Amino acid sequence: MKPTHLGRLICFAWLVAGSAAGLSQKMNASESSKSTNATELATYGGGCFWCVEAIFQRLDGVKSVASGYAGGKNENPTYEEVCSGHSGHAEVIQIEYDPKKISYQDLLDVFWQAHDPTTLNRQGADRGTQYRSIILYHDERQKQLAEAAKKAAAPQFRDPIVTEIVPLAKFYKAEKYHQNYFNNNPNAPYCQFVIRPKLDKLLKKLSKAKP
């Protein structure tokens, strides 16, 4: 594994130690691309999955969020393989949500604000195809909504949106120590200096946007 920057290296080393000590996962995570009768699924990638997982977990109507890999060809990829940039997979999250409380369109609105969709294969200091902006749709309806949302969001950005919109072939759930990462490890360096400021800023913005 070749970490993209020092902060993530420190965080990853700390995380492995915490995982060995038996940190428990506090929230349930979706493991497949199938939804239950009452919920639906959405799959997005917007840089480090630790960041976007923390954001979407805090939305009313979201039942669970799982960090994982998708968009590539390798079966059952490991974190090290994805970090190498050669697997073709992106770090993504799969969201299980209640459409009666939050719509797919609502999730897309947050998606554009949760990361920079104009930077190719990069989010902040994280660089590589595994950090690309990507929407993996589950059906034709999601595809149409995603494409329309991309066009509608374009005027909000100075540069062109480079987000991929592709069908989801298969979602591979990431290793256990990646799940619910921010909630389990709030004092880790990456959480303190990267995720927390980003999360606080976005939640404040979303709060002001509520009617």
Image (cartoon, grey):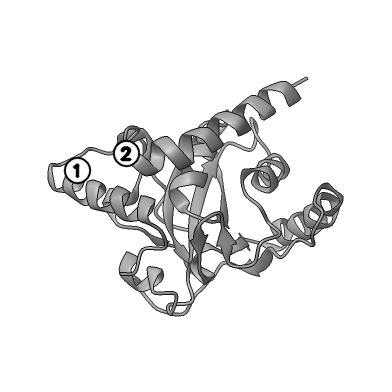
Marks 2,1: beta carbons within 8 A: yes
Q: Residue at x 66, y 61 (%)?
A: 119
Residue 206, image x, y percentages: 67, 29
Residue 61, image x, y percentages: 57, 31
Q: Residue at x 12, y 42 (%)?
A: 21
Circle 1: residue type = Gly
Residue 37 seen in the figure:
no
Circle 2: residue type = Ala
Q: Nearer the viewer, mark 2 or mark 1?
A: 2
Quarter of the image with the C terminus in it: top right
Observer-nearest residue: 97 or 124?
Answer: 124
Q: Which mark is residue 18?
A: 1
Q: Is residue 79 left or right of residue 208?
A: left
Q: Residue at x 62, y 69 (%)?
A: 167
Q: Which mark is residue 188?
A: 2
Observer-nearest residue: 129 or 140?
Answer: 129
